[in-house]
């Protein structure tokens, strides 16, 4: 069986969407003829934890650990303690204190390309020793953090092993970089790092078609695309009957710069016009939610309709998705978010509940929702589309039905994406 070294910062016990892509790939790769070996941090400062993912990793998989230094403890001390920040992300268009502005300048210009860059040199040293005695047929690095790709770049240069950098998000064209106060020198350095990775690797791997198209304009290296997906095993058995209420559910991080003000306005109007709708409506928010989102809901008279469950493990989030009446997926209100496909989208598809996406109607998410007939994407200010979509689900609910979708989604299963990855690894290992 061929062997692939996977270098990933986000790995159990990390929680969140960043860990799921490669936990699921690793889970199914051996059935496709590839034995994965994982290299992950020993002492990472993860923003969230979900130990339940550890059970997803086959016992046969070798997991190596390397120590990492990160600046986040110092950052929290600067801001006033472990729980000083209440924001989903500090890198946003929101107002910042002078301490936050200072910390962002330091982050932007002293840690290039990102604050995990301190993991690169010790990891290269450790892995060179390991690979001398335990060679592999291919190396995969998965970012963000994109500093991980610098590890693969060094190993590829030193050993000649085929190397695939996997981009779960864009690099220099990621939407939030414009909020970092980078100097022009820093920006040139970051762009040079990205270009070297794109040009020197064996094949670039993107996780959305639009990111794939973008990378193809930047390099002559082949660029493949394998999206995220859903694990059929997570959705076995009948869905929960729920509590009988009209549950509009969102799972995962809910950031202030993705606050769907128009949606809250529409729901507030519908609740004011229809006492039955007001009584039945529940907005179930599963995950960390920025304060501004809750304030916007309260401003529309919906505070009593909100059920803020806070961070939950993956199994609990899936249960919430499957028991929802409909699911909402507002993207961050930024034109540069157009190529992004949130990982939760694919689990929303598997939950078989209608999805109301909010974002660019010509973006990557809109393509998937149209293709699978799983829902619609409304523009951020499109009150009519939102009201009609919610109204149809409400009428079906009042008639005693459970809104559901039946489109073809098999190509997004984790088994299917693992098969596609194995084919890519076969091709790269044979041709280099």
Image: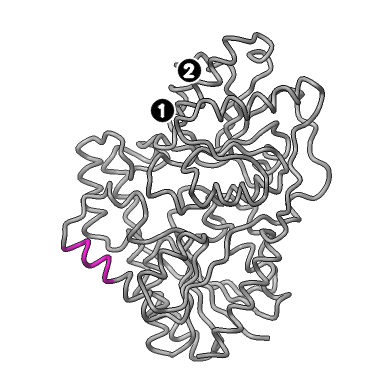
Which picture quadrant has residue 401? top right
Residue indicated by mark 1: 292
| Quadrant of the rendering where the N terminus is positioned | bottom right
- Residue ID at (38%, 89%): 158
Residue 333 image position (x, y, % from top left): 40, 39
Q: Upstream in the sequence, badge 2 or badge 1?
A: 1
Residue 405 image position (x, y, % from top left): 73, 42
| Residue interval drawn in magenta | 185-192
Describe the element under mark 2 as helix, strand or loop: helix
- Residue ID at (35%, 70%): 218
Q: Which SS does the magenta portion mostly show?
A: helix
- Residue ID at (59%, 9%): 273
Which picture quadrant has residue 107? bottom left
Of the pair 51 and 316, the residue shown nearer to us: 316
Q: Are marks 2 and 1 in contact (CB under 8 Å)?
A: no
Residue 291 appears in the figure:
yes
Relative height, residue 173 to residue 404 (above, below): below
Residue indicated by mark 2: 298
Residue 138: assigned label: none
Q: CA distance from mark 2 to mark 1?
A: 10 Å
Of the pair 345 and 87, the residue shown nearer to us: 345
Relative height, residue 419 to residue 256 (above, below): below
């Amino acid at each position: 069986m061929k062997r692939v070294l996977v270098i990933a910062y986000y790995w159990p016990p990390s929680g969140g969407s960043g860990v799921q892509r490669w936990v699921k790939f690793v889970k199914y790769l051996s059935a496709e003829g590839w034995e994965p070996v994982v290299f992950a941090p020993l002492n990472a400062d993860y923003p969230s934890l979900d130990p339940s993912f550890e059970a997803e990793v086959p016992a046969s998989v070798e997991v190596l650990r390397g120590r990492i230094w990160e600046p986040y403890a110092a950052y929290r001390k600067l801001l006033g303690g472990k729980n000083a920040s209440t924001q989903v992300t500090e890198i946003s268009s929101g107002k910042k204190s002078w301490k936050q502005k200072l910390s962002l300048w330091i982050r932007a210009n002293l840690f290039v390309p990102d604050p995990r860059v301190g993991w690169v040199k010790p990891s290269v040293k450790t892995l060179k020793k390991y690979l001398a005695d335990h060679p592999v047929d291919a190396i995969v690095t998965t970012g963000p953090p994109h500093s991980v790709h610098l590890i693969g770049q060094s190993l590829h240069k030193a050993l000649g092993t085929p190397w695939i950098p996997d981009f779960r998000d864009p690099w220099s064209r990621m939407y939030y970089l414009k909020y970092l106060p980078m100097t022009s020198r820093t920006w040139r350095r970051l762009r040079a790092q990205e270009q070297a990775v794109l040009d020197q690797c064996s094949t670039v791997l993107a996780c959305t078609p639009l990111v794939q198209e973008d990378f193809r304009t930047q390099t002559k290296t082949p660029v493949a695309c394998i999206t995220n997906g859903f694990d059929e095993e997570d959705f076995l058995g009948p869905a929960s009957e729920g509590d009988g209420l009209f549950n509009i559910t969102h799972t995962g991080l809910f950031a202030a710069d993705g606050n769907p003000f128009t949606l809250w306005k529409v729901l507030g109007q519908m609740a004011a016009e229809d006492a039955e709708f007001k009584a039945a409506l529940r907005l179930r928010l599963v995950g960390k939610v920025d304060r501004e989102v809750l304030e916007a809901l309260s401003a529309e008279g919906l505070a009593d309709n909100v059920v803020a469950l806070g961070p939950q493990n993956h199994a609990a989030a899936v249960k919430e998705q499957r028991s929802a009446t409909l699911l909402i997926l507002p993207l961050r209100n930024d034109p540069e978010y157009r190529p992004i496909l949130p990982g939760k989208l694919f689990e929303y598809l598997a939950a078989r509940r209608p999805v109301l996406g909010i974002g660019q109607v010509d973006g990557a998410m809109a393509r998937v929702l149209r293709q699978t007939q799983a829902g619609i994407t409304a523009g951020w200010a499109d009150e009519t589309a939102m009201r009609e979509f919610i109204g149809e689900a409400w009428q079906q609910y009042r008639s005693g039905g459970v809104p559901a979708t039946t489109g073809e989604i098999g190509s997004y299963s984790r088994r299917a994406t693992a098969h596609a990855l194995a084919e890519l690894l076969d091709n790269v290992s044979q041709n280099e």
